Amino acid sequence: MKILGSGALNLDLVYEVEDLSIIRKAGFDLSPGREVAGSHEEVKRLRTFLGRTGRLVAESGGGSAANTICALAALGHSCGFAGVVGDDEAGQFILDSMTGVDCSLVRRTGKSAVCVVVIGRKMLDRAMFVAPHEGEAIFGGPALQAAIKESEVLHLSSLVEKSGIRVHERMATMLSDGQLLSLDPGELYARRGLDALVALIKAASILFITREEVAMLTNASTKGDGVSEVARYLGQMVHTDRMRASYPVLSQCRGSLLCMKMGSKGAMALCGGRRIFQSAASVKKIVDNTGAGDAFNAGFLHGMLSGKKIDGCLSDAMGLAALSLSGYGRSWLDRINTGSKV
């Protein structure tokens, strides 16, 4: 396989409410644009409340890296995934949702992770509450090692368990010259701070991150915008001449690349000391912004693997992110399969 992903595998349950403020008033610690983790019992209480005050609009496979990998598979890339789902009906649903992805490295045991996504119709904002699989970081073995060695790109996103970062660090150490690590830490990893993520950031060729996550990593409220502080750990990868020839993005950067996603304000790539900006693509109607950042990652990696330079990769990333806004969960992927282009 060309691209191997690893991260959380969730059953996403998407609810609509009139306004997210009613969630907080009811005592649930959910805020617009944020993701928090808790227990399956808390998910049950939240779903009971939403059953009275909201509307279930979609069920979908979820997880940041999984969303990215599914989009890349829909774009025609050979993809696989390593992680854990439950040995239950939800686990089968999650695996069935990974269309075109080799899931032979996904372990099945226990109870599947559930992520409740709540969308406020009034402001079109969303909040997420995830109850993780209790053994989500318990995967690996010779088959995983072999898959990593055979991949061109390893794409990682956060696991909820504290041991997740260590598991992903070990996966990163299995990469050799000529292979790339793509990292999207997400809010759950970013909250743990820069010190916890230094090893992974140093190993990354591409770091996908949001402005809010940069602030979490660096306490940017007291240290400026924080981007420069994160970026100083990048650029430490020495890419071979063959890699730079295969991926023009790397020859432009002379090292690793930071892509900061800024929602409706577009995106910024920090490359070789330069900041390259890309405006957001126009969207007629936003249905669900959950996973737009994951689609952005897929678009950028697709452009990179297609031999495009940074401007082209950013344009592909924004185009795919805009397309993802048009449907709940992963339903928008059908539009790729029916001939839409990035």
Image (cartoon, grey):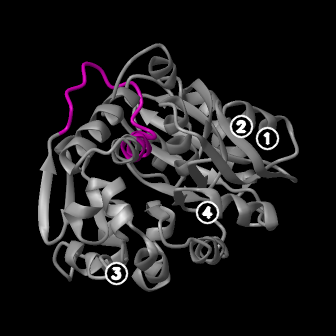
Given residues 25 and 240, the one toward you in this image is: 240
- Mark 3, Cα crowd under 10 Å, few <14 / some 14-19 / many 20+, is some
Residue 216 position by quadrant: bottom left
- Residue 306 visible, this angle: yes
- Mark 2, Cα crowd under 10 Å, few <14 / some 14-19 / many 20+, is many
Q: Earlier in the sequence, mark 1 or mark 3?
A: 1
Using the image, determine if residue 283 lies above or below residue 178.
Answer: above
Q: Are marks 4 and 1 in contact (CB under 8 Å)?
A: no
Which residue does the image show at 52% across and 37% down from the upper left?
77
How far is the residue under mark 1 from the one under mark 3?
39 Å
User: To which residue does mark 1 refer?
Assistant: 91
**Amino acid under label 4?**
Leu
Q: Quadrant of the C terminus?
A: top left
How far is the residue under mark 4 from the one under mark 1?
17 Å
- What mark, if any, has residue 236 been given in the picture? 3
Given residues 316 and 151, the one toward you in this image is: 151
Which residue does the image show at 48% across and 75% down from the upper left?
200
Q: What range is drawn magenta here?
A: 280-298
User: To which residue does mark 4 refer?
Assistant: 159
User: To which residue does mark 2 refer?
Assistant: 94
Q: Earlier in the sequence, mark 4 or mark 1?
A: 1
